[in-house]
Image: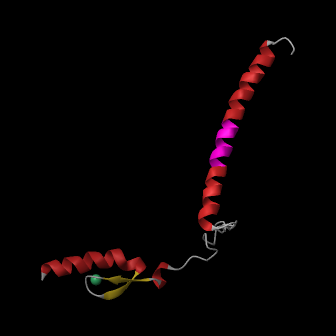
């Protein structure tokens, strides 16, 4: 072994830091991947990725809020999703006044 210099010593300290960090990250990642494969089969499907940002994680386009309807438990009516907060404000105060 050659005589240690300041440079070789600093290199080995740096190597030590880097390799412990790499081992730590890789060990966590492989354990996590192993647990996922164990739970969801040999080839878990990754979330859909759309570069243009138009499709969601299932590869579906955005659904319009106005085309979704919520059931209001207070008055038993179907209310459009984008008007639900306004509806609840009126619906609940109306119930209290009577
Ligand atoms: Zn209502």
Quadrant in which residue 82 is drawn? bottom left
Quadrant in which residue 93 is drawn? bottom left
- Residue 11 is left or right of residue 20, and the answer is right
- Where on the image, by quarter, is ligand 1? bottom left
What secondary structure prevails in the magenta region? helix
Was residue 26 drawn as part of the magenta stretch in this picture?
yes
Percent position of residue 36, x then y? 61, 60
Q: Residue visible at 68% across and 29% down?
A: 17
The residue range painted magenta reads: 21-29
Q: Residue furthest left?
A: 98
Percent position of residue 14, x then y? 72, 26
- Residue 94 is left or right of residue 14, and the answer is left
Q: Residue visible at 84% across and 11% down?
A: 3
- Residue 38 is left or right of residue 97, and the answer is right
Q: Depth check: 91 or 56 in front?
A: 56
Please state, as top left, top right, bottom left or bottom right, where the N terminus lies in the image: top right
Q: Residue furthest right?
A: 2
Please state, as top left, top right, bottom left or bottom right, where the C terminus lies in the image: bottom left
Was residue 89 drawn as part of the magenta stretch in this picture?
no
Quadrant in which residue 52 is drawn? bottom right
Q: Residue visible at 25% across and 82% down?
A: 74
């Amino acid at each position: 072994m050659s005589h240690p210099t300041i440079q070789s010593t600093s290199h080995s300290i740096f190597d030590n830091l880097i390799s412990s960090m790499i081992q730590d990250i890789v060990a966590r990642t492989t354990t996590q991947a192993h647990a996922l494969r164990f739970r969801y089969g040999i080839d878990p499907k990754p979330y859909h990725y759309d570069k243009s940002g138009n499709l969601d994680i299932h590869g579906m386009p955005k659904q319009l809020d106005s085309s979704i309807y919520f059931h209001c438990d207070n008055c038993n009516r179907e209310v459009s999703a984008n008007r639900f907060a306004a509806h609840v404000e009126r619906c609940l105060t109306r119930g209290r006044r009577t």
